Structure formats: C-alpha cells, structure tokens
Image: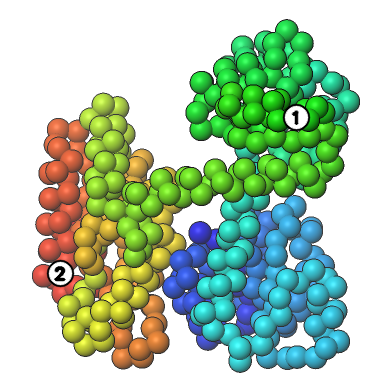
Amino acid sequence: MLQILHIDRSELFRKIMQEIVLRCGHSVHSVATKHDALSFIAKHNIDLIITALEFNDGDAESFILDLPQATKQDIPVVVVTSSDSLELRERLFSLGVVDYILKTDVNEDYFKHFFATLSAEDELSRFMRDMKIAILDDSPIILKVIHRILDMNGFRFVDFYIKPGDLLHTTSIYDLYLIDIVLPELTGDKVIAELRSRQPNAIIISMSQFTGEKSISTVLLAGADDYIHKPFDAASLLSRIKINVRSFQYKKRLELMAVTDGLTGLYNHRFIFERLEEEHAKVSRYGRPLSVIMLDIDNFKHVNDTFGHRTGDVVIQSVAHAIMANIRKSDVAGRYGGEEFLILLPETGLSAAKVVAEKIRSTVAQLRFETKDLGITISAGVVQAQKDESYETLVNKADTNLYNAKRGGKNQVEG
C-alpha cells in the first residue's frame, strides 16, 4: 500500500482524489498549502506526491525546490492542474516531475495503473535495499568493487567475508549471499551446499572468473540460484540481483495467494483464524492486550439486488481498502465471509480499538461510487480479549456487539 500526499487548495478536488486513492487501495493525506505539505513530509515516509500547480502560499516549482530541505527521500512528484503549456511542462519535467496531468483527464483507471506500476517498482527497490547481504570473496579488490556498487545503489545491510569459516560460523542470517567459487580452506560449492542446507529460502549467487559447464553445474547443483562471471560491472551485478529477487518475490506472492481472499486481497477466513489463535495465545500466556473488530456492510443484499453483483464486488473491495488505510502494519485484517470482515488489533485496548473502528466507519461513509445513488455504511462490533476465555468466545462477543450495532440503527460502532 502506497503512502500518498495530495496538495491542492480546492477542497472539492482533494475529496475527489481521496476517494480515487482509497478505492485503489492506498493511503492518502490531503493538505491545502505548501507549508503543511513540507511539515508533513518532514515527519512521515511518503511514496508519492500528487500536487496542484499553485497554492495560496506558493507554487509547485518552489515546493519541488524546497523538498530536499524537508526530506532525504527521493519522492516522485505528479502535477495535476488545469493549466497547460509546452513551456510549463518542460520546466516541471526538468525539475524531476514524473508526470503532468490535466484535471480534465483525471480518472480512476489512470491512477490505478500508475499506482500499480509505482508499487511494483517501489516494492522491488525497497525490498532489495532492505535485504541483509553477505559477500564472500578472498580478493580485497573484488570486495571493494562490490562494496562500492552496492553502496552507490542504496544497499544498507551488507557484510563482507574473506574466509569461508568466518561466514559459516557467524550467527547472522542473510537474505542474499554472493559467494566466490575459488576460496582458501573450502571450495565455494561446499560453502554453498552448507548455506543452502541451513537456509533453503535464501538467494545464493555464485561468482567466478572461470567459465565452463562443469564449474557452473557444480555450484548450481550445490544449491546456488545463479552464476555471475568476474569481472562484472555495476549493471551486470544489479541485474542479477534484481532478477533473482523478483523470482523470490513471485514465489512469496504465490504463498501469499494461498492465504488471501481473491476479491479483496485481505487474508482469507482460514488464515485470519490461524492468526487469531496465535495472537490470543499471547493474551493467555503473557497478558498482552488484543482487541477484535467485526464489521459488516449495511444493507448489502439491497446493493446486490438493486445495482448488481459486480457493483457489490466493487463495494466489498472499497470497504477492504478503507480498512487497510486505517490500520497499522502490525494489525491483521481478513474477510470473514460475504460482506463481513474481521480485524485483529494486537497490543490494543478496547478504547483504542473503538477509535480505529470509528475511523473505518467514517471513511466508508464518505466513499462515493460511479453509481451516484449508491451510498455505503458499515456497522462494527468491538471487543477486547480476556485471559480466561477462548478465542471462539471472543469472536462470538464481537459478533454480538455487531448485531447490537445493526439493531441500534446501523452505521455505528458498538463495544
């Protein structure tokens, strides 16, 4: 999920963009001035900035020039405006703007595609740079070259080893290994075999200045994922890393598909109950707080009967996006079934959980759809886990509170 900042002095257009972003499954914070935007950026991690051309306290050009003073992040900027000229476009693109869109051309399909592309590249780059990497090579020169390449490209967690024994005896665990084949004390293929036996899911890339089918097949059979010939340049090394990381992500994505709901992308019924059992065990064992939100879309049968099942699917997806936009990374959200959702809030008491539920309720109530007559609300039941009760009892209590919210008039939180 992308964290997006939108800047526009028009309250109406800020609301339009907020609805588009939420329906696309991302989080958005809207401000009206350059000052508020720079203040927010200085305190938060932002993946994308969507900005108007002019504000009451400045314009997009001055804002972009002031960005480096507010953050060290390289944040992509999209300008959305009613004004257009070739000279203006060229000036903004020269400042690093990644796209320039007229407000008359703004539509959900465009941003859905744009966000998907940005998410894929951003996810891969962020994942790569956060990886823990071990380099094993007995050549100080090669280690220095690799260090320079990785450092210039933002890799932060890299350790270097000259002796195989030092790597094999460390207690550190790495996501990616670059292993030379010709080493003192122990051959590269034996090091690779040992690493693979310990870490079946790690990425291992072998390196050697020698070529030949035998050497390549030996290291691949030992457990290496890939092979790179020395000497190599920065582009060759980075492309090898990227290819293998992307394959690793595809594998993880397939694993994720087994535990997620196909329509919403939230966790499925089976997995959410597995996580509930795990989190509830912490309550019983350590006395950790845990709260649960059970929510349901009001009058959903009427939506399906009046507007059709395709619109019903869009509504369910939009509610799922609203949920994700209002919970933390440590929280767990799942589709309980049909139009019902279950949210687990670890380390959260009842009063804080009710605040989260109210934020979700309010966000959903403000959603607008292409079908103009369609308005959606949700009802929610909130409960905090107790040490002396089962997780089944916890869910039943949340369900009872949800029923009371429905009976009390809907579009409300009970707990």
Give the color scheme: rainbow, by chain, secondary structure or one colour.
rainbow
Q: Quadrant of the C terminus?
A: bottom left
Q: Secondary structure at mark 1?
A: loop
Q: Is residue 238 left or right of residue 339?
A: right
Confirm whether residue 384 shows in the render: yes
Instruction: Give the percent coordinates (x, y) of residue 358.
Output: 32, 64
Residue in view at x 74 percent, y 44 percent: 238
Residue corresponding to mark 2: 406
Viewer-side residue, 205 vs 347: 205
Query: Is 20 drawn above or below residue 210 in the view shown?
Result: below
Secondary element under disc 2, as helix, strand or loop, is helix
The circle drawn on residue 212 is 1
Q: Specify the quadrant of the image occupied by residue 84.
A: bottom right
Residue extending farthest right: 141
Q: Badge 2 local density, few (<14 within 10 Å), some, or many (20+)?
A: many
How far is the residue under mark 2 from the one under mark 1? 71 Å
Q: Position of residue 29 (x, y in %)?
A: 55, 67
Of the pair 200 and 173, the residue shown nearer to us: 200
Query: Are the residues flagged by discs 2 and 1 in contact, CB closer than 8 Å?
Result: no
- Give me the residue at 28% from left, 36% from top: 278
Residue 181 in percent (x, y) is at 73, 22
Q: Of label 2 and label 1, which has the lower sequence position?
A: 1
Q: In this picture, is 151 found above or below 318?
A: above
Amino acid type indicated by mark 2: Lys
Q: Is residue 178 shown to the viewer in this render?
A: no
In the rendered view, would you say 360 is above or below 368? above
